[in-house]
Image (tube, helix red, strand yellow):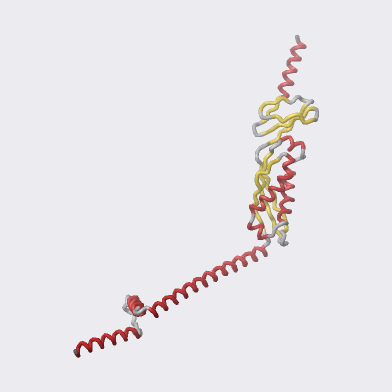
Amino acid sequence: MEFLAALLLLGIFVILSSIRQINQYERGIKFTFGKFSEIMDPGWRLVIPIFQSYQKVDIRTKAVSVPDQEAITKDNISTRISAVIYYKVKDASKAVLEVENFYLAIDQLAQTTMRNVVGEVELDELLANREKIAHRIRDIVSETTDSWGLEVLSVELKDIILPENMKRTMAKQAEAEREKRATIINSEGEVVAAQNLAKAAQTMATVPGALHLRTLNSINDISSDQSNTVVFAVPLEVLRAVEGLSKLIAKKSKS
């Protein structure tokens, strides 16, 4: 009886010591006699000591901050670029069996890929199409990490740092572009104003009384300030109108 009780206690102890907890955000990789046997889902799982071992893998989305990388663009401009890569483990067995340390591996892969992609584009394209460049980096990284059981969700470019002399050159270029646009807008406005003035002059020259009405309107505007003394020439057509009116009055008085 004592032997059976001891054996029972030993069995209970072995079972209790064999229980391993796998959390909801983890997967367990079980090895039996050193060989991969199964993926353990969340919950309590048995791992027999000595004969079996296991390794946990976190399957939550991870963010890898890629430090500043010195890169030279296609047009030979030196830049420093940094990024963030978001990825998750989609196959826990591959993440353990196919690569030694997938945390370090994806970080190193991202650094070399960033330098290579930046070297394929010119500076203007790098600054104008950051999202396109990020997608290109993600696609290249995904081609390799897929065999590691990893899924690259997105790549975001954080900073693109340029040399100080290049910043000054770009600032001068932007200022010159703004001055160019301002000059074009001013010249277009002058053309429209000149066309309107030409139409107004043509109207006053061809329509009877138009110049007289414009003169009266100008006098009305000026007369609002009584401190001004205005001297103006009466248009010829007004004089002719007055002359015609006086002749008409003279004819009526004779008759």
Q: Is residue 138 above or below residue 253?
A: above
Depth order, front residue of 158/92: 92
Which x, y percent locates residue 189? Answer: 49, 71
Give the left or right position of residue 104, taking residue 213 as reference. Answer: right
* Quadrant where the image shows the C terminus: bottom left
Q: Residue at x 66, y 29 (%)?
A: 42
Would residue 251 be seen by someone viewing this image from the given angle?
Answer: yes
Which x, y percent locates residue 58? Answer: 68, 36
- The quadrant holding residue 235 is bottom left
Q: Residue at x 68, y 28 (%)?
A: 21
Which x, y percent locates residue 100? Answer: 77, 39
Depth order, front residue of 77/184: 184
Depth order, front residue of 213/21: 213
Give the left or right position of residue 185, taking residue 24 as reference. Answer: left
- The quadrant holding residue 145 is top right
* Quadrant where the image shows the N terminus: top right
Which x, y percent locates residue 121? Answer: 70, 57
Q: Is residue 214 above or below residue 4?
A: below
